[in-house]
Image: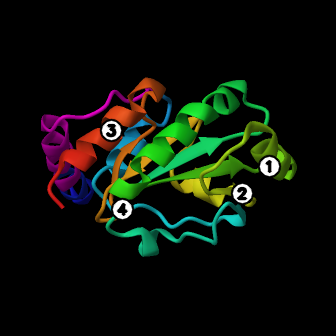
Amino acid sequence: MKRLLLILPTLALLRALQAAPSPNLENTPHRFEVTAMHGRAAPALDLSGWINSAPLPLTELRGKIVVLDFWATHCRACLSSVPSKNELSQRLKDQGVVIIGVCLRDGGERMQQMVEKHGILYPVALDAKGWTARRFHVDSYPDYYVIDREGRLRWGDIDNRDLEKAVRILLDEPN
């Protein structure tokens, strides 16, 4: 009974969020856990070795739309998407959109080299302990998570083709 009382408000929130326009989400093994986080305060980032920026705690990014791009240095799809994320980052930064590349710890020693080789322009940091990926239930890469201006995780594990759609939906919402 106690568990049911905890689940009911989450289900009501999920129904409200599903009624609003939304991007397609990937159907992954952790879908339930990720979806249960939607509408709640995004977990804190535990990142190090920042490139292209000083450390960016989510608490200091309130009022901005934040895209977390979980990637790996050995992931071809991750690296081939860099030009489109560079372009998106540059085009929307004046509208308050911040993309943060969260490099997974496996291969993280090559992060600086990959940033330089592939010309990553947006902030990138290493998830050296793997805590950030665990908190967000990341199970593949690239994996995109979008945080709204209030610091709430709006969508996690977005279909890669719908990243800009998700950002546009939030940009269209009143501030």
Q: Which residue is mark 4?
A: 64
Q: Which residue is mark 1?
A: 111
Mark with earlier residue (2, 4): 4
Cβ–Cβ below 8 Å for labels 3 and 2?
no
Mark with earlier residue (1, 3): 1
Alpha carbons under labels 1 and 3: distance apart: 27 Å
* Quadrant in which residue 53 is drawn: bottom right
Mark 2: give few (<14), some (14-19) or many (20+) Cα within 10 Å. Answer: many
Residue 140 visible in the picture: no
Cβ–Cβ below 8 Å for labels 2 and 4?
no
Question: Regarding mark 1 in the picture, which secondary structure is present there?
Answer: helix
* Quadrant in which residue 126 is drawn: bottom right
Mark with earlier residue (3, 2): 2
Q: Quadrant of the C terminus?
A: bottom left
Question: Regarding mark 2 in the picture, which secondary structure is present there?
Answer: strand
Cβ–Cβ below 8 Å for labels 4 and 3?
no
Q: Amino acid at mark 3?
A: Ala
Q: Which residue is mark 2?
A: 126
Question: Regarding mark 3 in the picture, which secondary structure is present there?
Answer: helix
Mark with earlier residue (2, 1): 1
Cβ–Cβ below 8 Å for labels 2 and 1?
yes
Alpha carbons under labels 3 and 2: distance apart: 24 Å
Alpha carbons under labels 2 and 1: distance apart: 8 Å
Alpha carbons under labels 2 and 4: distance apart: 21 Å
Magenta-tinted stretch: 9-27
- Per the rendering, the mark at residue 95 is none
Cβ–Cβ below 8 Å for labels 1 and 3?
no
- Per the rendering, the mark at residue 166 is 3
Alpha carbons under labels 1 and 4: distance apart: 25 Å
